Each structure stands twice: as C-alpha cells, then as structure tokens.
Image (cartoon, helix red, strand yellow):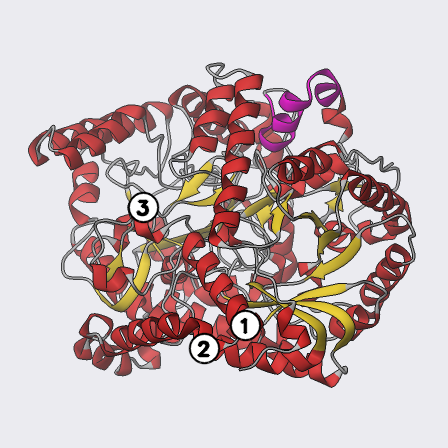
C-alpha cells in the first residue's frame, strides 16, 4: 500500500476510553463521596486526574486526536440530560441546591424521590439513565462540563475532539415523563432541542474545538421515514450554523442502512462508521452512495467491544478500499473503548500464549496507531507488527485450547426433543402447586443477598493464603445460615441461599467450566460504580463437576421451605463474557446449555424443587435490526430450553430478566417455556406486566416491586400499590412478589427493611383478594 493524499492525512483516534482507572479509582472516590468519606473537592480532583491520565495514555500511545466529554461520574446520557437542562421536576430542587448531589439523586434516587429509569445501552451491558420528557419540557443549554473538559485537554497541548450524544439519539432514547401520556413522542421536541445544541456547539468552538463528534447510534436501528426525516432536518440545520466547529456524526454497533444516504448528503464535514464484522455492510453501502467526497471518514476497523487482537492485514484491506471513498480516512475503534477492560498487560495469571491473543483498550489503541501509520506511510513501515500479528493469529487458530472433539460431538447430537419439557405448562403448573403448596402472591427474591465487606475480605484472604479453605467455607456456611434465618423470620415463601460464595453471576460459573478464562483486572463499567470482570470465552465448553449443588443442598437442609437453585443462563453467560469470534454464537450457546443442563439435572436429583436460570441478557443481545432477530431468538430460546427441559413436571423452572425493554421479546419470553419469570418493573411502573397481558402470556410472572438499584427503601404501601397495578394485568394465581433484581449491591439495613415491606405488601394485597 502506498501513500496517497488521503492516506497522508490519516489520523489515529478513539471515541471514548475506560473511565475507572487502573485500580478503579473512580468507583472508590464516588462511593466514598456517597458515604461521606470523600469531599466533593476530592471527588472532582480524582476525576480530573483520571481524565488527565487517560488523555496522556492515549497521546503517548500515538493517538493524534483525543476525545473529551466521554468521561462521566455516572453516565454520559445523564450528563447529556444536564447539558440540555432536561432535569425532571422532582429533582430540580436537589440539583439547584447542590449540582453534584442532585446529579446523583437523578441516578440513584433518594428516600423521598425516585431516580430516573435505567436500561441497557443498545445491545451492550452498559446501562444508561433514561431521559424523561413531555410536552412541557423546556431545554436550556449548560455546556460547563463539556467546555471544561475540552480546556483540560488543550492545556495538555493535545488535539481534542469533544464527544456528545447526538440530538436524534437523545430523543429516541427518551421516554414520556411520569404523568405524560404513554403515546407522547419525545422526537416531537426536536425543534426545541436543536437551538440548545447550537448554543453548546458555539461554546465549544469558542473554547477551541476544531471538531465536535455527535454520536447517533440510534440510527443503526430500523427507523421510520419520520425519524429519518428528523435526522435529515437535524444535520441540515446544525450544518447550516455559522458559529460552530466542524461536525463528525458517528454511528456504531451495526450498519447504518437507510440512514447512511441521509447522513452522507448532510452538510457536515465528516462521518464515523463501524466497519467491523457486525457492520461490514457499511462498506458496500458507502460505495453505493458515491462515498463521501470532500469529507472526512473515521473508519472503525478495530473492534471496540471484544478483546481479541485485530487482524491487521484484513483491516488494512478494508482501509485501502475506503481510501477512494472519502477526502480523508482516519482510523479508530468501532465504538468507545468504554466496553473493554483497560490493559491486558496487567493479566499475570493467564497463559502468556493466550495473552498474546488479547487486546484491551491500551492494546487496541496500539493497533489503531499501527494501522494509521501504515495508511499514511505504507505497510513497509509496519512489517514487524504485521509479522507478529500473523503469528499470534495462527497460534490461536492452531491451539488445542480452542477445540474439544467430545464437546462438539455432544452438541452435534442434540435433537428437538432435548429442548421440550415432558408435559405442557398447564399440567406442570398443577403438579408444581400440589408439590410446593405456595400461597397466592408467593414471595421470593431474585437470588443474591448483600455481598458484605466481610465476604469480600474472606475471598481476598483465601486468595492471599491468610485463611485456608476450611476457614473460608465456614464463613460461607455462617452467611447462608443468616440469610436463610432472616428469610424465614421475614416470611418469604421461596428462599434463596444468598450466593455468598459467588464473586459474580457469570464469573463464578466461568471459573468452573472448561473453555473459559478469568481475568484479574479486566473491569468494565456496567452502570454507575458497578464494574464487572467479564470472563473470556476462549475454547469449547464443558462442566467437569457440579458447581452449585453443594451450597444449595446445604441451604435446603436448614429450612422446610423450598430453596431455589440459582444458575446463570446460556445467553447471559455469552452476553456478559467476551465471546470467541471463531465460532458462531449459536454453537457456543448450545455448548454452554449442555453444561448447564447437567447442573440443572444434578440440582433436581439432590432434592431442589425450584430452579432459577437467569437470562437478563436475552433482550440485551437482541440484534439491533429486526431482520437479524429471528435467527438469534431461535438459537437463544433453544439454548434455554435445552438447559431446563430435562427435569420432572413438578420441578418449577424460573427465569429472571431486568433493566431492558421487554416489549420486543414477549414472544421469545413465551417461547422459553419457563414456569415463572421475574422481571424489572418498579422504575417502569409495571409496564412489563401490561406487555405480558397484551401478549396473552399464560404462565406465572413476578414484575418487581422493589427497585434494588436505588438505596431508597420502598414503603409497604408503595409496594402494595405496585402489586395492585400488577393485578390489573396478571391474575392473582399467576402473580409473584419479588424485587427487580438481585440484592448483591445493597446493604443489609436497606435490604432488611425493603424485604419486610415487600412481604407486608403481599400480605395486605392477599387479604384484599376475594375469597375463592
């Protein structure tokens, strides 16, 4: 490849970077602030230092244009809500009194005021705070954060590009505020919002911005003609502004489709497109519209969502094709690097052969810089990098670590009958009611109980050798005893053991399955200060021995009430891991399902009558384009049924989902054929119950009445009122009472009070039911 005028201008850039710091300094500072141990000034100083260090890391790696505005104390969509002044009425007083406390009140709520709803950011495991808008919403510009962070970067002597959530995506992500009719369309507020964006753009230009990036990932989804018209109008109007920086409109996670010609024709100076496998169609589509003559193209050729090394030669081929389609081609990751861990070099416990296959955020920036160098100066300048990359790719392809013939043979022998229960639901339900003897509106929890500092210390002490296995297991037994005792005293009907032995609902299982690798420092933000370490799925999956039977059986020995067995389902095991890219997801899901099927059968054999297989990621992983969904849902629901269909009719199978838009997958929820499903519903005011009713969902359901992602304790009357709302959609004989999600992140004080109120609410509403 030789240099051309387009290639000579090539820059390396990224859209965003992990926020937490090498040792999760941001998490510690924010949680310290919430607990009163860290002052507001100290929190600001920690955040400023992390931003400085992130930008310097990028610059030192060779990134020539760094992003600003991507850093957040909690969530970048919430930051956008502040930027445009769309503060909910119930939070205005708190925000006016103290901007930081008001910001966190919107995110987490207070005892007296509910937080904003939270849901998944497209098909990722990142959660954003949903904007609440209505006909009376008045937008006002507040560019303080965006301008300040740009000035920080410029003061470091760096070329910087502010990154904002685009106005179309912001409105498409929003929902009607409480009290606003459900059919209100936030997009109708576009004409009010655009002048605010114009003001922010002018402020950024005045502060020194040459370019501003406007992220419009919502445009990779199926969009109506009216929505596409709104996008056309948005960038026509913003492009016509005279007092603005150059505009780079960015999309990611999938192909742009019908939105591509709209943006290609818009009077903006550049587009940023995803060219990884999920969005490969963008390449042909861009050529079909005649490219971007006179414009900048930022090519996302390095996967920003997975952790495998880039195929440099393949990416160079894509970049070479793109050179003729734009005035200037720059190189980037496909999306923000927020979705991957910080540094693979920190992993000391993974086989060095495997580490060379991995690329976290720092390694991806190196790949981007390498590709930009080749694009600008020719591939002769990176012969060493190309040779090493080719060898690493070959090492992985040829490694026996990635293939197990016995696992593949078992998966290949699966039949349709393996994914069907032996009796239909109506017959199973009768058998289960007779076997379990539960009251109407039975109460339960989702699985986990608070992970106390003592539990985390015990795990750390075990790893460090300060206590032995016997000492650690005694601590686990004590915790299970306390959890079971509390639930019995409170009056919960179906108990859980609390999962004190589990570090994470995916990692715990991954550490016991072949084919998975666990990281030590691979933290990724899920929401707010909640960080997870997704395991790495590197090879074929099997279960050498039982994983949960011992502790579940112990918990059951402590009570006459049923204790649920708790497993993470196959789709969630994939969605919350870094999956392999050398095997179709459906095939990997079948392998995981067979391993979990063995566990389900062993739990039943040990005397467990209620088994919950959580699938919170079923909706999250739904393809963004409707045309791609049928194939996904076919293998996803098959995997769940394969996991759960080997049990007796009187064994009750539960599943759980949370913090997603469920309306799109109600039929798939039905197709799972679970006996009971529990779902998030408190923040969305029982919306999912209405969706299930509209579908005619025939099985039992527990729409949550306690929002566990907020520290506030719901009163018994508040929970009862939600239950009454639920009863309007789901009959009492099929309605369960439970929190929205697991209680791992909550403290014991609020957990006790909330669950006592939940049980009291169930008793109150149960007493209101007509006598049968």
Task: Please tell me the numbered disc located at residue 554.
Answer: none
> Badge 3: few (under 14), some or many (20 or more) residues near its Cα, within 10 Å?
some
Taking 225 as reference, is 561 above or below it?
A: above
Q: Are marks 2 and 1 in contact (CB under 8 Å)?
A: yes
Q: Is residue 106 magenta?
A: yes
Nearer the observer, disc 3 or disc 2? Answer: 2
Label whose residue precedes the other's in the sequence (3 or 2): 2
Task: Please tell me the numbered disc located at residue 377.
Answer: 1
Rendered image quadrant of residue 635:
bottom left
Compared across the picture, whether 9 is left or right of 311 comes to: right
Label whose residue precedes the other's in the sequence (1 or 3): 1
Task: Please tell me the numbered disc located at residue 380.
Answer: 2
Rendered image quadrant of residue 149:
top right
> Which residue appears at 43% of the width and 69% of the height?
310
Over which residues does the magenta segment extend?
93-110
Measured in 3D between alpha carbons, the distance from the residue under mark 2 to the one under mark 1, in whole angstroms, is 8 Å
């Amino acid at each position: 490849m030789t240099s051309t005028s387009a290639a000579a201008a090539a820059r390396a850039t990224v859209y965003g970077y992990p926020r937490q710091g090498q040792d999760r300094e941001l998490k510690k500072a924010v949680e310290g602030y919430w607990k009163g141990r860290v002052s507001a000034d100290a929190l600001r100083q920690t955040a400023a230092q992390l931003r400085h260090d992130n930008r310097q890391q990028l610059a030192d790696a060779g990134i020539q244009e760094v992003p600003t505005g991507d850093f957040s104390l909690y969530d970048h969509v919430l930051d956008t809500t502040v930027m445009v002044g769309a503060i909910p009425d119930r939070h205005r007083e708190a925000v006016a009194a103290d901007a930081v406390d008001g910001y966190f009140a919107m995110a987490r709520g207070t005892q007296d005021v509910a937080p904003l709803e939270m849901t998944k950011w497209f098909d990722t495991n990142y959660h954003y705070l949903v904007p609440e808008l209505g006909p009376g919403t008045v937008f006002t510009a507040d560019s303080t954060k965006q301008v300040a962070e740009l000035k920080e970067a410029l003061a470091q002597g760096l070329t910087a590009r502010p990154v904002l959530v685009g106005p179309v995506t912001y409105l498409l992500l929003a929902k009607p505020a409480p009290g606003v009719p459900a059919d209100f369309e936030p997009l109708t507020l576009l004409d009010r919002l655009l002048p605010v964006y114009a003001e922010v753009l002018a402020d950024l230009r005045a502060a020194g911005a040459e370019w501003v990036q406007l992220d419009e990932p919502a445009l990779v989804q199926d969009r109506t003609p009216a929505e596409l018209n709104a996008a056309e109008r948005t960038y026509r109007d913003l492009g016509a502004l005279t007092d603005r920086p150059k505009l780079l409109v960015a999309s990611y996670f999938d192909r742009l489709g019908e939105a591509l010609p709209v943006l290609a024709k818009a009077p903006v100076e550049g587009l940023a497109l995803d060219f990884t496998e999920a969005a490969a169609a963008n390449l042909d589509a861009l050529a079909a519209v005649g490219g971007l003559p006179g414009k900048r193209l930022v090519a996302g050729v390095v996967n920003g969502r997975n952790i495998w090394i880039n195929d440099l030669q393949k990416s160079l081929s894509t970049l070479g094709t793109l050179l003729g389609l734009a005035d200037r081609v720059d190189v980037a990751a496909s999306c923000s690097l927020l979705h991957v861990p910080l540094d693979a070099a920190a992993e000391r416990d993974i086989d060095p052969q495997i580490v060379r296959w991995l690329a976290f955020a720092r390694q991806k920036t190196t790949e981007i810089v390498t590709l930009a160098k080749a694009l600008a100066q020719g591939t002769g300048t990176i012969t060493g990098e190309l040779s090493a990359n080719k060898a690493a790719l070959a090492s992985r392809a040829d490694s026996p670590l990635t293939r197990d013939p016995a696992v593949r043979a078992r998966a290949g022998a699966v039949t349709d009958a393996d994914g069907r229960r032996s009796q239909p639901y109506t017959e199973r339900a009768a058998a289960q009611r007779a076997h379990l003897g539960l009251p109407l509106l039975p109460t339960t929890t989702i699985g986990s109980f608070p992970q106390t500092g003592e539990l985390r210390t015990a795990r750390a002490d075990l790893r460090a050798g300060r206590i032995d296995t016997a000492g650690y297991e005694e601590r686990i037994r004590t915790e299970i005893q306390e959890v079971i005792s509390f639930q019995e005293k409170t009056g919960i009907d179906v108990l859980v053991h609390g999962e004190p032995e589990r570090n994470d609902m995916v990692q715990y299982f991954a550490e016991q399955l072949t084919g998975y690798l666990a990281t030590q420092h691979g933290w990724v933000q899920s929401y707010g200060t909640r960080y997870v370490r997704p395991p790495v799925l590197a090879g074929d999956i099997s279960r050498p021995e039982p994983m949960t039977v011992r502790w579940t059986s112990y918990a059951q020995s402590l009570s006459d009430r049923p204790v649920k067995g708790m497993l993470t389902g196959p789709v969630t095991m994939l969605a919350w891991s870094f999956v392999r890219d050398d095997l179709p997801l459906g095939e990997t899901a079948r392998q995981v399902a067979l391993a979990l099927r063995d566990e389900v059968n062993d739990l039943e054999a040990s005397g467990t009558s209620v088994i919950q297989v959580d699938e919170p990621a079923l909706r999250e992983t739904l393809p963004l384009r409707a045309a791609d969904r049928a194939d996904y849902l076919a293998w996803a629901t098959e995997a769940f049924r394969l996991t759960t269909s080997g049990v007796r009719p009187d064994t009750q199978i539960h599943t759980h989902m949370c913090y997603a838009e469920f309306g799109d997958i109600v039929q798939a929820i039905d197709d799972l054929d679970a006996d009971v499903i529990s779902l998030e519903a408190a923040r969305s005011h029982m919306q999912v119950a209405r969706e299930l009713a509209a579908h005619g969902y025939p099985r039992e359901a527990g729409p949550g009445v306690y929002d566990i992602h907020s520290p506030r304790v719901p009163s018994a009357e508040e929970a009862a009122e939600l239950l009454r709302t639920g009863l309007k959609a789901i009959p009492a004989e099929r309605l369960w009472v439970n929190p929205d999600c697991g209680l791992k992140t909550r403290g014991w004080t609020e957990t006790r009070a909330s669950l006592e109120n939940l049980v009291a609410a169930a008793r109150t509403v149960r007493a209101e039911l007509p006598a049968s």
